[in-house]
Image (cartoon, rainbow, N blue to C red):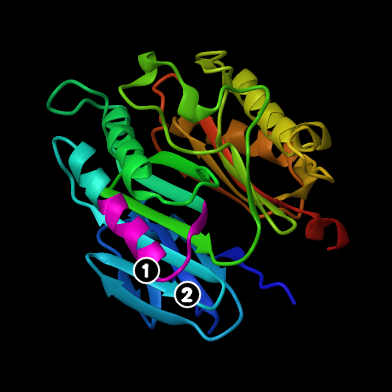
Amino acid sequence: MTAAIESRFIDPDAIYDADALARIVFGDTSGPPGIENGVPTLRLKMYGEARDGFAEIWTSAGPIRSGSVNGLVFAHNDEFLFCAGFIPVSDRYTDATRHAYGDAFALAGELNFAKIFRMWNFIPHINGANDEGLEVYRDFCRGRAVAFEQDYANASGMPAATGIGTWGDGVGFCFLACRESTVRHIENSRQTPAYEYPQRYGPKSPSFARGTQLHDTLFVSGTASILGHETVHEGDLDRQWSVATDNIAHLIGAENLEAQGLRSGYTLHDLDQIKVYYRHSADLPRVTKLAQATFDSHASVRYLKVDICRADLLVEIEGIASHRRRSD
């Protein structure tokens, strides 16, 4: 039987399963991750009040072992690894990001989990400038790219990822990796691969794929109103929402997947565990209505007001597409 990994959203104070591999708390505090009740836990300041927060739990069956090394926390069973780390707030993130990512890649290699299939990066002041005048996100991307170039040994390519703002101080990051499962990284023919962006977007391109497929599940990277490599519909929430969701629909659809040698596409109604990142508080009622009109009524959706990787983007969306939803 093929090993499986699943996630769900719960109350941040709820009791979680014994087979929990990871816990990410979207609340009112942030800092270095720790082992809490045997489970690696990353706390992120993504809400102004704790009562508005939630936790995401990742579970996988089988004996789970957890530990910590070099400021990283991790847990794994025979097939899946979760790892989380933290980069303290800084005037310049390139070197610290390169070293933190390098340590994380080394750990994954030592534990024999070479195939990273999903990553998240939560970056403070993401649209601000560092001490050399470079945007913080571009500063971070430079360090991450060097780590991928020098420390990531897997030739299968870069995984699905999200790079998004946080209200905390310091960069929180985490990833999931596997041992034996087949992993396929997916691009979107409507968009330039992020790792091929022109230099106008920074000294090093962002290092991620638009999606990654594992078994019958497709992990959708943070997706926004970008066609080719350019933001479209600046200042127009509804039209940015339309492009972002059209991008997801195309990414996970049969035509795009078949062109990359994969069978059986998905639709937006196969999407679950959805996070909607929005920039302005006043947009939440509209964003909620748009999500209700777009996604399956039974899908789990959470909304986070944070800054987004480009200052001209108003909304970004991620989720997980699975055929299992059709039989629910």
Query: Tag 2, which secondary structure?
Result: strand
Q: Is residue 202 left or right of residue 319?
A: left
- Is 104 included in the stretch rendered in magenta? yes
Q: Position of residue 313 (x, y in %)?
A: 48, 23
Q: Position of residue 154 (x, y in %)?
A: 48, 51
Q: Position of residue 210 (x, y in %)?
A: 58, 36
Q: Residue at x 45, y 66 (%)?
A: 82
Q: Which residue is mark 1?
A: 110
- The magenta segment is 100-117
Q: Dot 1 surroundings within 10 Å: few (below 14), some, or many (20 or more)?
A: few
Q: Is residue 236 left or right of residue 101?
A: right
Q: Residue at x 66, y 58 (%)?
A: 182
Q: Residue at x 38, y 19 (%)?
A: 201
Q: Nearer the viewer, residue 211 or 279?
A: 211
Q: Which residue is mark 2?
A: 76
Q: Nearer the viewer, residue 46 or 159?
A: 159
Q: Is residue 162 left or right of residue 97?
A: right
Type of amino acid at the residue the image marks with label 1: Glu
Q: Nearer the viewer, residue 276 or 221?
A: 221
Q: Is residue 106 left or right of residue 237?
A: left
- Is 27 included in the stretch rendered in magenta? no
Q: Position of residue 85 (x, y in %)?
A: 31, 59
**Quadrant in the picture for the C terminus:** bottom right
Q: Dot 2 surroundings within 10 Å: few (below 14), some, or many (20 or more)?
A: many
Q: Nearer the viewer, residue 46 or 185?
A: 185
Query: Tag 1, which secondary structure?
Result: helix
**Quadrant in the picture for the N terminus:** bottom right
Image quadrant of residue 284? Answer: top right
Where 195 falls versus 327 (above or below)? Answer: above
